[in-house]
Image (cartoon, rainbow, N blue to C red):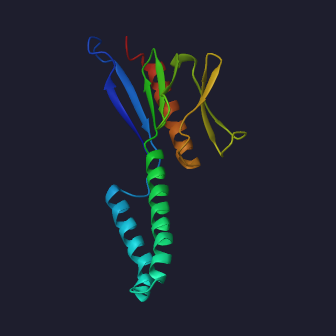
Amino acid sequence: MPYAWQDIDAAPERSGAVSHRLVVWPHRALTPQGFVWFIGITACLIALPLIASLGSPVLWGLLPFIALAVGGIWYALKRAWRQGEQREVLLLDRAHLSLTRHDPGRTDRHWQANPYWLRVALRDDGPVEDYLTLAAEGREVELGACLSADERRSLARELRQRLAALKENGDDR
């Protein structure tokens, strides 16, 4: 799944205090090496018909369109790769919850709340199936926009369990 939980020490001076860190990222279809291979193979396959036109003026008529096609594919894949740099980072301990969303080309967006009052909801009336939201203190934010419906359900279940454990155990006392 494209998210990971990490337990970290919330404060070294408070023994036994636990904080949770969640990082959510979008799926990636290609690795950087796969990107190079895909562009190379695509360029070769598109260039194959040019072999028949070598030495003729037709080559110069086709060459700009082939270069434009390979350039368009390269641009689209690079743009998709850049969108893959999106991250949502949630920091959670007994007294504080902080959510930061990093989108490429935009300033980071931050949201904070008291976890005691936090509501984790999977809504059916959202823009996608099982729209995952966090609500507290009169504000509601989306979490896991890049996840599938199954992944959002799983994340909601795990987040509720961690919140319940923090409330029950009183980790920082």
In the image, residue 154 above or below residue 13? below
- Farthest front residue? 57
The quarter in which the C terminus is drawn is top left
Q: Position of residue 29 (x, y in %)?
A: 44, 57
In this rendering, the answer to whether 126 lies above or below 107 is: below
Dividing the picture into quadrants, the one containing residue 118 is top right
Using the image as rendered, state which of residue 13 and residue 77 is in the foreground.
77
- Residue 160 vertical placement versus 93 (above, below): below
Residue 59: image quadrant is bottom left
Position in image of residue 15 (x %, y %): 27, 15
In the rendered image, residue 84, in percent from the top left (x then y), is placed at: 45, 46
Question: Going by the image, does 64 lie left or right of 126?
Answer: left
Q: Residue furthest right?
A: 125
Q: Nearer the viewer, residue 34 or 18?
A: 34
Q: Position of residue 144 (x, y in %)?
A: 53, 39
At 51% across and 39% down in the image, what residue appears?
155
Q: Is residue 2 above or below residue 167?
A: below
